[in-house]
Image: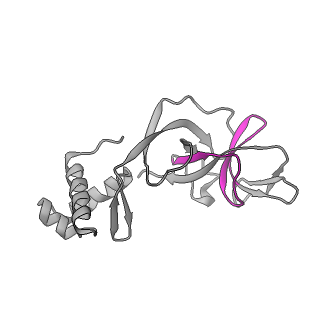
Amino acid sequence: MQKVTSSQQNVLTFYNDFLKENWRTPTYKEASLSLGINPSAIYVHVKNLEKKWLIDKFGKYISVTADTFSIPLLGSIACGKPISVFESCDEYIDVPKSSFRDGQFYALRAVGDSMKDVWIKSGDTLIIRQQSDVSDGDIGIVTINSLNYIRSIYKSPKSMIDIWNDWSVTVIIWKNIDIKWKLVSVVRYY
């Protein structure tokens, strides 16, 4: 789990207690008055807790998601040229249980920018779920001739699968591919 500062922990505890007692999200001003710190500092702490996936923010509403579990970071996947194997797993990242309930989840680091048209940038952490089929338009990790690719996937009527490199490249049609994982979330750290 990413390290939480004592100030962040105070804000997290306040939000959790306030939500349980009042059934609503406190305002930044309420949190500021209760904790004795500036509202802009509350805002910064909330943003940092959101980046650490300890809270979810939906507009002005905040929920505490401190219940997390670790998933293995398998290594990197190239957005562009394929790679033959993933690196060994020696790192884990924490994700909220509320967002990732069913399935086997893993993480990969994106390298390259060929998937920028679908908002995946180099350095992003990709959360993937192990599954052997995807719907049209889903982004998946596929294996073709022992090489792993990340692509947007579309099935054609003849059971072939079209794999788009990015919107500026023509469609590639493959007959024998093995779908391994489906992309379920992209995490970007600023």
Give the residue furthest to the right.
158
Display coloring:
one colour
Q: Horizontal and vertical percent for residue 139?
A: 65, 54
Q: Horizontal and vertical percent for residue 59?
A: 38, 70
Is residue 135 in view? yes
Q: In terms of secondary structure, what is the magenta stretch mainly? A: strand
> Residue shown at 42%/42% (left/top)?
69
Query: Where 185 falls versus 85 (above or below)?
Result: below
> Residue shown at 61%/41% (left/top)?
77
- Total label count? 0
Is residue 170 in view? no
> Residue shown at 24%/51% (left/top)?
8
Q: Which quadrant holds residue 152?
A: bottom right
The quadrant the N terminus occupies is: top left
Q: Horizontal and vertical percent for residue 170?
A: 79, 58
> Residue shown at 69%/60% (left/top)?
137
Please indicate whether residue 15 sits to the left or right of residue 89 in the image.
Answer: left
Residue 78 or residue 51, whichever sits in front = 51
Query: Where 34 falls versus 95 (above or below)?
Result: below
Q: Which residues are magenta?
A: 124-152
Q: Which quadrant holds residue 134?
A: bottom right
Please indicate whether residue 108 sits to the left or right of residue 44 in the image.
Answer: right
Please indicate whether residue 30 sits to the left or right of residue 48 in the image.
Answer: left
Instruction: Let me know if residue 180 is in the magenta part.
Output: no
Q: Horizontal and vertical percent for residue 86?
A: 61, 33
